[in-house]
Structures are given as C-alpha cells and as structure tokens.
Amino acid sequence: MTIVLYELCAGDQARRFSPHCWKARMALAHKQLVYETRPTPFTRIKEIAGGFSPTVPVVDDGGKLVRDSFDIALYLDETYPDRPTLFGGEGGKATARFVESWALTALHPPLLGMIIGDIHAALAAPDRAYFRESREKRFGKRLEDVQTGREGRVEGFRQALQPLRHLLERQPFIGGQTPLFADYVVFGPLQWVRVISPFRVLAADDAVTAWFDRCLDLYDGLGRTMPAAA
Amino acid sequence: MTIVLYELCAGDQARRFSPHCWKARMALAHKQLVYETRPTPFTRIKEIAGGFSPTVPVVDDGGKLVRDSFDIALYLDETYPDRPTLFGGEGGKATARFVESWALTALHPPLLGMIIGDIHAALAAPDRAYFRESREKRFGKRLEDVQTGREGRVEGFRQALQPLRHLLERQPFIGGQTPLFADYVVFGPLQWVRVISPFRVLAADDAVTAWFDRCLDLYDGLGRTMPAAA
C-alpha cells in the first residue's frame, strides 16, 4: 500500500516548505519507498486522522500512523530493513540526534528570524491569521520587526555553519561518502528557506552550498522539483 | 603486548592536559585495553619513533604506530572488534566526524583563548619558549593579551554548548544510553581546561556539567585520576 505523507503547504498548495516535512520526504526517497503527499495547511493539521498530531509531518503507512520527522525515519528504518539504511547502525542513530540538536539550536532560530515575514506572506488567509498570532506571541513583536535587518544577520548565520564547512573538507556528506538521515536534518532547514523566501542565506562559493546542491540532486533531483521562491 | 600511548605533559610530567591525548586515552579505556602512557613535552615529540608525527597522541601497539586521536580510535575499533565499539557502526563513524568538526570549530578556539596563558605557565622552560613563539605568531599578539578578558567571554562559550545541552534533554550521552567516541571528542577539550586552568568555564547547574561529570566517572573515574588545576 502506498505510504501517505501529510506535508505543510503554503497558499499555493503545491508549495511545500516545512523543514521537518522535507526531512521526512527525503527519508522516504532514501528508503526507495512509494509515497503520496497530502498538502496540509497549518489550520487543518488537526483534521489528520482525528487530531493525531499537532504538527506535520505525519506518515500513514497502511493505517500505521507516525509523527515527527526523526521518529518517522526511525520507523522507516526499522520497518524496511532491506532498504538502504538511514542511520548506518545504532551509533549513527544516537549521533544523528546530535546533528538534529545542532540544527534545531544553531540553524533554525536564525533562519526563522530571516524568513518569518516571507512565510506569512506565502500562506492562505486562515493560516496567516494563525501564524501571525502564534508567532508574534512567541517573539513578543510584529513579524515584520522580527525579519527586518536580516541583511545584517546573514553573515552571523554563515559563521554558524562552520562545523559543517569543516566536515565537508573531509567527506562529501555528513553520512560519509553517501548521505544519511543526518544530512537531511540539515538539508531540511535550508530547503525551507529556498522554497519560501527569495532571500539568499548561502554564499555561492561556500562549500555548504556545494553540499546543499548535492542534496538537491539526490533521488532524481527530488528537492529541485520544488521551485525556489522568486 | 602492552600498548604505549605518548601523551603531552606539562612541566609536572604527571599532568597530562592535551585534549587530543585525552580522547585517545578514553578510547583505550573504552576498548578495555591495557596501556601505558609516556609523558612527552612539546619539544620532544619529534623524538617519538624517529620523528613519526609532529603531534601527539601517538600509539605504539606492538610496533604498529598510529597518530591522530580519531585515527587511533578507528584503528582500535578495527583491530579489536571483539571489544566494546567506539562508533556503533559505519554511520556512527561518519557522524562522529561531524561532532569532531563541531568541537574543533565551536569549542577549541574559544577555550584556547581562555586558557592559553595558563598552559604556558604550566610548561617546562624549553616548552614555554616553543609555545610562546609558535602561538604568538599564530594569534599575532602576546599570550597574555589573548587570555585577558576571559570572564567576559565565558558566557558566549556557554552559549556555544547549546546543541549539546539540547541533546542531553533526550539522552545521557552523545552515544545514546552509553558513551561512544563522539562523547570523548567533546570531553577532551573540557578535560584540557579542567587539568590546566583554574578558570571555570562550565556553570555548576549546567546539564553539560552533569554530562562531563558522568564522563569523568567512566572507567573507574579515569578522568578524575588527573587532579583539576587549582
């Protein structure tokens, strides 16, 4: 049975921008599984399987529901052990959690601050109201005031990528010669920006950009099937 | 045959402070191997095995020489596969390189800047001259001027530990329920500071401090056999 992946969508439902949903989609492709996606606006996530999860991605694998991108990857690796591994063993699972913690603390917050207005602008009307209210409460200021000044912050963000840049002097992927889920954990937030914002957070001559391009090439250019925001 | 580990030493040859040598020593203990250490001042590294390596650690395993802490860990895991694994599989090896890149770029530079004068003060006279000349050339200023103002920089360093702090909300070690080499890669630089400098870089109530204490407890308190600098 075809796996169903519920993904966050913009006002244009073809535009799938969630970093976490991209991690799940790359994991499905890595496992060579057949899947369909279901566009899901923020305000309709609660309708998935009777309110199964407050967030997407959610995967429905023949009635088995799994939420959270990392848990989805763990589920897929355990359920389909004959497909290419997403972790490369128990040590890879544990250490991928460190990569996730790094991405969530060092990359997501500065990136969100640089694209939050662009996200808002791309949403459908009901999602816009939800997004503005919930995020302005979190930040304690207007979305526009969060995003403003991003040109002055982008260099600091690029500095935060230094661990990845250092690694890429040694090996082409975080997973080594080929990618693992740890790569998708970092690909996700950069794809988020690429799909939803015209602001360029990576410099063209950065080794991280070359790695991101390699990730976009994977699985017949899966990441490129989603156009970059103009 | 007993493995020999050549370690950097201070003027007090019992004081072994190199972060990289601590990674190697923890790896040997993790593998339950019998080893002896040889104290090696900076200026006598070139005498090891006829100039085998410009840096320590160096391991001599019955005539087989290996240098570089990560390469030593890889060698030990491959040579002694029946002992506890340091990586937990191929994915763990690749991803541990990311942890190493993070530690080398986000932790080592700020830590060195806070303890470089203390290192100098702890060395024997010939090492002091070498250390001052080589490091002042690298930094372009006097060692004392590098270290000064550390009280104002320590909070920034603690912020840089946020990825590890976030991970430790989920699991007790980077390796998961038990430590892997990835843990020692981060333990090393913190043990470096503990052994050579009275300056306290970790706050007592930090989850990272609790993790560091767990690492100090490993292998019958191996890390604690080296007294903290007073």
Image (spheres, coloured by chain):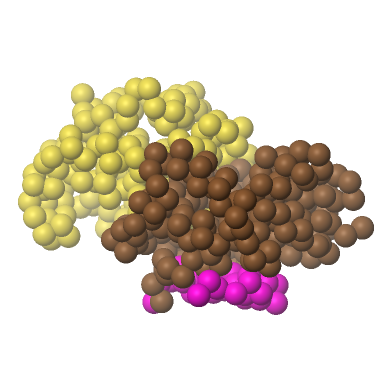
Chain colours: A yellow, B brown
Figure quadrant of the C terminus of chain A: top left
Which residue sits at x=84%, y=57%? Answer: B3
User: Is B213 part of what is drawn in magenta?
Assistant: yes
**How many circles with numbers are drawn on the protein?**
0
Which residue sits at x=88%, y=60%? Answer: B2
Q: Main secondary structure of the magenta part?
A: helix
User: Is B124 part of what is drawn in magenta?
Assistant: no
- Give the vertical position of A152 relative to B129 (above or below): above
Q: Which residues are magenta?
A: B205-230
Q: Is residue A200 left or right of residue B28?
A: left
Q: Residue furthest right?
A: B1
Whole-percent x and y of residue B44? Answer: 71, 48
Quarter holding residue B85: bottom right
Which residue sits at x=57%, y=45%? Answer: B130
Q: Is residue B196 visible?
A: yes
Whole-percent x and y of residue A28? Answer: 50, 40
Q: Is residue B82 left or right of residue B200?
A: right
Which residue sits at x=20%, y=52%? Answer: A43
- Give the vertical position of A88 relative to A94 (above or below): above
